[in-house]
Amino acid sequence: MNDLLLPLGQVAAIGGAVAIGPLLWWRQRSRTGTPAGRLRALTLLTLFLTFDLIVFGALTRLTDSGLGCPDWPGCYSAASPLGAHHHIAAAQAAMPTGPVTHGKAWIEMLHRYLASGVGLLILVMAVLSWKLARSARARHEPAPSPWLPTLTLAWVCVQGAFGALTVTMKLFPAIVTLHLLFGLGLLMLLAWQHEAYRPQPLAVRPALRLAVAAVLVLTLLQVALGGWVSTNYAVLACDEFPTCHGGQWWPHLDFAQGFQLWRELGQRADGGYLGFEALAAIHMAHRLGALVVFAAVIALAWALRAPAPGWAKALLAAAGWQLASGLSNVVLDWPIIAALAHTAGAAVLLGLLTTLLARLQRAHP
């Protein structure tokens, strides 16, 4: 038990040190604001750092650093790679291009430190939201519900649990994909929460509100497909565009094997190796989904051009970014910068749609 609790406490302490800087900056910048305004500023800061965490998590995955420290929460039971120097050196000497190297260990642990810092910020937000609600109730004034920050706190704890499972289950594709989705869900919760502290209602027809919700759901499904592509390393299964491989528009695809969710990385459910046809099926499903989502975002932007032209332009820019970065992954052989840009674009698109939906919901309770 001490092998778990001691590094857990040490990593949490380092995460606390990471959070001190943003907290001091927030306290200095918002000391003259109202309690609700200060809480909104903290939410926005946490939202920004959560976006950074998502992108850094993508970097961890793309550099094959997910097992840079093959245990959890520490690195060979140490708080940092410095304390695990001999273990890492031995693993790297045995397998120089393997999952454990000094560089990969630092990337993995920096990701954990940043995640701990974000968790602490969310804890502070939850505590302050309850204090705000209690003081507002004493003055018989309205205040945003503290239950959404509380849900956000519970959500980030579940996200941390999936982070642990990502390591202990050796990059199990379904777990890694859920870890990504929970991270993006955290971003969406914070975006919605940020709107609650200073409502900016936007009046539109109820049908348009429903359209925004539908596009948000479609985008989430597409992001899940993208996560499945990334966690199965299926990006280059189709290395051409618009064709897939060898000039084929529709090669032989094995959707049954590709979308068996509960299996080891690179393996079928029966233990055999996952074939090219399965990887190509995963890739093509994501490519077709991209066409549907891109068309849906274009249609939504067209519908928003009169009531909310700024939002229409923002959605078009995000969709264009995703199209360009996604194509770059294929035609440029998956450079890290393009892959990171694609993950960042997905987070931005989800954040935009969530914020827009929150404003429309407030316009029509």
Image: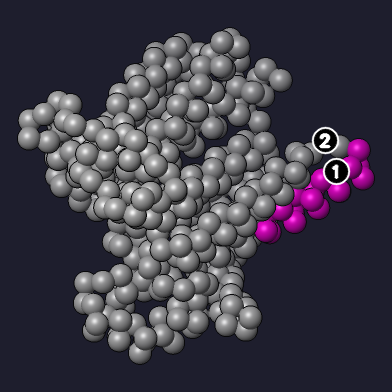
Q: Which residue does the numbered mark 2 point to in the structure image?
A: 142
The local secondary structure at tag 2 comes to loop
Question: Residue shown at 43%/17% (left/top)?
Answer: 300
Question: Residue shown at 82%/35% (left/top)?
Answer: 142
Horizontal and vertical percent position of residue 109: 43, 71
* Residue 287 image-quadrant placement: top left
In magenta stretch: residue 271: no
Q: Which residue does the numbered mark 1 point to in the structure image?
A: 136
* Residue 19 image-quadrant placement: bottom right
Three-letter amino acid code of the residue under disc 1: Ala
Horizontal and vertical percent position of residue 347: 43, 41
Question: Residue shown at 32%/74% (left/top)?
Answer: 100
- Left or right of 78 in this view: 13: right
How packed mark 1 is, by other alpha carbons closer than 10 Å (few <14, some 14-19, many 20 or more), is some
Kindly check if marks 1 and 2 are in contact, taking CB atoms under 8 A apart as contact: yes
Q: CA distance from mark 1 to mark 2?
A: 6 Å
How packed mark 2 is, by other alpha carbons closer than 10 Å (few <14, some 14-19, many 20 or more), is few
Give, as a single range, the part of the protein colored magenta: 123-140
Three-letter amino acid code of the residue under disc 2: Pro
